[in-house]
Image (cartoon, grey):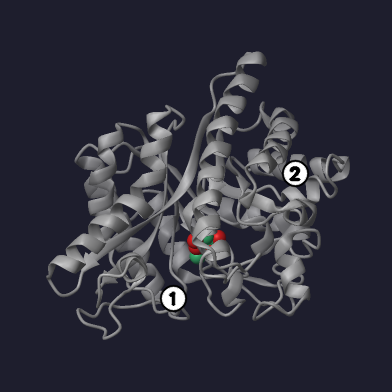
Amino acid sequence: MNKFPDNFLWGAATSAHQVEGNNTLNDWWQAEVNLALKEASGAACDHYTLYAQDFAIAQELGHNCHRFSLEWSRIEPQAGVFDLAEIEHYRQVIRELKNRGLEPVVTLHHFTNPVWFSQFGGWSKFKLRKYFLRFVKRIVPEFAHEVKYWITINEPLVYSSHAFLLGRWPPQQKSLLKTVKVTLNLAGAHIQAYRMIHRIYREKKLNPPQVSIAANLQAFEICQPNWRNKLAVYLRNKLYNFYFLDLLNSKKTLDFIGINYYGRNLVDVENWRLSNLLAQTCGHNHHPLPKNSLGWDIYPQGLYKLLLTVKKYNLPVLITENGICTEDDDLRWDYIRQHLAVILKAYTEGVKIFGYIYWALLDNFEWAEGFSPRFGLVHVDYGSKKRLIKSSAWKLAEVIKGKQGVDGS
Ligand code: FCB
């Protein structure tokens, strides 16, 4: 039966650019206009207008929290110029959540940057970090009374590698040096933002906030057992999964561990080159697993192992994202149920997990992949913008309400 604690956080996530629509002032929109990407985000889900309706759905589904991001480019459309109407918009968003009993989990940076920031040079310049910190300093006091949970930066390593190494995301560069610089810059930004947010709460005599990042953790598994693959798994765990968390933890700038988990990365490396060691995966579908519609391997056991590994930090854990894109909603429910089952197992074995946030509340704009991958608990008709709650969402609601176990009981 369902033994999740009574005060467990249950919810789903979105990010501004993926759902709001018409985020014309950020670097993604600019790349979309320049036809540098497969699809343009356009009006997306029009969540900017329809947020109240979407939160009503989340409430109906039994959620008690919601993760979303503030769009920096809306709030600060020009360097140093803050748009009060946009600040007011997000105040309404947070108010709507609170009125519906949904605890806000607020992300400050979810992959997008204001155009002016990227034109100045973006995250590859250390000295520009100050602009992000100025934004944090301006916006956090606005919502400090309402918000307890802050995610400073979403998936820093996914951002730095996709934007500066693989050349897939704006600014579409391919430089190892810049990737390293951006990663270090994001780490520095988090550390300073963490301290700043805590200072703001202290000055306002508020209870301390809970601040973290959302770390993308992958289950790196060996395909053929050989030394090269073992070394590759070791390196990938060290660099991609734990480098950032270890660093921030050593600076005491994590109040909890935010984990985004999707699945397995099957490691098979054909030579000793660093680029192969760090990135090559099995191209032969050895050890096949069910996959999502983007071909990612579904592997709940991987989450279980990672949860036991993060026990070393002795910090509370929040699943900040976990989800599947598929047209097959039964598969979605299987995915959710299996992941909840390992979360419950890890919880009963002492991992201090305090919440589960499904990615995503709505079908949405999946970055360079466009609109075809459907991750939502709620179907969005992109023409009419009509929402349709999927049956997996109702099944999750039964678990949340304690009426159904994750083992089918
Ligand atoms: C994560 C991102 C999120 C979404 C999911 C599928 O890497 O944080 O915005 O795109 O993947």
Provide residue 121's location: percent of width, then percent of height: 71, 53
In the figure, is residue 129 to the left or right of 275?
right
Name the residue located 61 percent from the left edge and 27 percent from the top edge: 197
The numbered dot on residue 329 is: 1
Does ligand 1 reach within 8 Å of label 2's beta carbon? no
* Residue 258 vs residue 333, the one in the foreground: 258
Mark 2, residue position: 90
Provide residue 127's location: percent of width, then percent of height: 67, 40
Provide residue 80's location: percent of width, then percent of height: 84, 39
Name the residue located 60 percent from the left edge and 16 percent from the top edge: 202
* Residue 122 vs residue 304, the one in the foreground: 122
Secondary structure at badge 1 equals helix
Query: Looking at this rendering, what residue extends furthest in the bottom direction?
Result: 284
Name the residue located 60 percent from the left edge and 67 percent from the top edge: 173
Q: Earlier in the sequence, mark 2 or mark 1?
A: 2
Q: Is residue 336 above or below residue 65?
A: below
Q: Are marks 2 and 1 in contact (CB under 8 Å)?
A: no
In the rendered image, is residue 302 in sight?
A: yes
Measure the C-alpha gap from mark 2 to mark 1.
32 Å
Q: Is residue 323 above or below residue 142?
A: below
In the rendered image, is residue 318 in sight?
A: no
Q: Amino acid at mark 2?
A: Tyr
Q: Amino acid at mark 1?
A: Asp
**Corner quadrant of residue 361:** bottom right
Provide residue 117's location: percent of width, then percent of height: 75, 51
Question: What is the quadrant of the C terminus in the image?
Answer: bottom left
The numbered dot on residue 151 is: none
Q: Residues within 10 Å of mark 2 (few under 14, many from 20)?
A: some
